[in-house]
Each structure stands twice: as C-alpha cells, then as structure tokens.
Amino acid sequence: MDPTDDQTDAIALSAEEYDAVRAALTACVVGPRAGGQQPTLNSLFQQWSDIAAELEQEGYSDCAPEFHHSIRCRSVLAQAWPLLPPRVRSIRQPELDRIDEQYRRATVPWPDRPEEGAGWWDRRVPRRLEVEASEHREGDWPLGWDTTPFPRPAAVEVITWG
C-alpha cells in the first residue's frame, strides 16, 4: 500500500503502517522494477490480479519462463505477507483470496504435486495456451513449454494462430 496509490479501500492507514509496508517490501524485493520504481503493495496486487484475469479470459501466450516471471509478484506477496502489519493483512486478505481463486480456476495443478502449501502458484500451469501454429506439436507441450517436467495434461488446451 502506498499513500499515493489510488486504493478502493476507504480505510486509512497510519504513517507507521505505511512505513512497515514499505519496509516489508524492501526486505523482499531485489531492486526496482522496470522504470526504476520500487513495487508497492498495490502494484503487486494489481500485477497478480492482471495475470489472473488474463489467464481466465484469454489464456497465456508466452513461454514457460515468462509465465514464471509473470507470477513472481505472487511470490513477493507471499514473502512480504508475514512482515506486514496485522491490520494490513486483514484488510487485504479477502482481495488476495479472490485473486488466488481466480488464478486457480484459470490454471491446472502439476500432476503428482501438492496443490496447497508454500509456492502452490508455481506448481500450476495455464489452462489455455495460445501459440503460433509453428510452435504447436500435437498432443504435447508447444515450444517454450517443452521443458515442463511432465507431459501436457489433457486439461491444458493449446490454441494456435497463424
């Protein structure tokens, strides 16, 4: 949370709470993101919400390494969460739960891996992958996903274009 962010929650945080949020994020984030700005709690929530919505509505059109980069915001949220003030966590928990559920609906779990626990979001793949026709191999992972350590689950749909 950042006092300059436009947040829909009408609950005002104290200066001490803002400082604690900044300290938690500083402890968990290595360097600024593109553009030189440190991420805020709001920007991390927005990134997580955006990727969950994209996956649910359109699928994913980049390779597996890019996917893991795209969902890194959730890992940062998980690292920062226990360092945040309890009131901030209680305010933001319903939103995090909603986005997590949206992400779960738009992805499938890795076979034979726990679906819960630390880092559960890293053990899921998009339910729908959009790839160029030249990258698609029938019945298998498309190029860019072929390093995934298990065969493509039937629940993962590959949509081709071009």
Image (tube, rainbow, N blue to C red):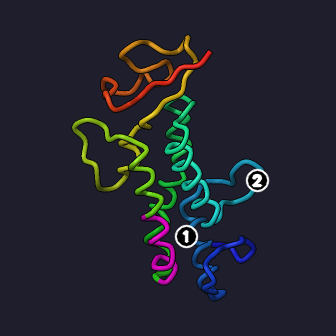
State the mark number for residue 24.
1
Relative image position of residue 106 (x, y in whole percent): 43, 44
Relative image position of residue 25 (x, y in whole percent): 58, 66
**Mark-to-mark CA distance, 2 and 1:** 18 Å
Relative image position of residue 114 (x, y in whole percent): 25, 47
Q: Which quadrant of the view contains residue 57?
A: top right
Residue type pointed to by label 1: Ala
State the mark number for residue 36.
2
The answer to which of 31 and 39 lies nearer the viewer is 39
* Drawn side of residue 140 relative to residue 38, left or right: left
The verdict on residue 94 being magenta is yes
| Vertical arrangement, residue 125 with respect to residue 77, above or below | above
Residue placed farthest to the left in the image?
112
* Drawn side of residue 129 relative to residue 35, left or right: left
Q: Residue at x 59, y 19 (%)?
A: 161
| Vertical arrangement, residue 100 with respect to residue 82, above or below | above
Location of the C terminus by quadrant is top right
The answer to which of 146 and 30 lies nearer the viewer is 146
Q: Which of the two discs, 2 and 1, labels the residue nearer the N terminus?
A: 1
Label 2 sits on a secondary structure element that is loop
- State the extent of the magenta-drawn residues as a range: 87-97
Q: Residue at x 54, y 49 (%)?
A: 53
Location of the N terminus by quadrant is bottom right
State the mark number for residue 105.
none
The verdict on residue 108 being magenta is no
Residue type pointed to by label 2: Gly
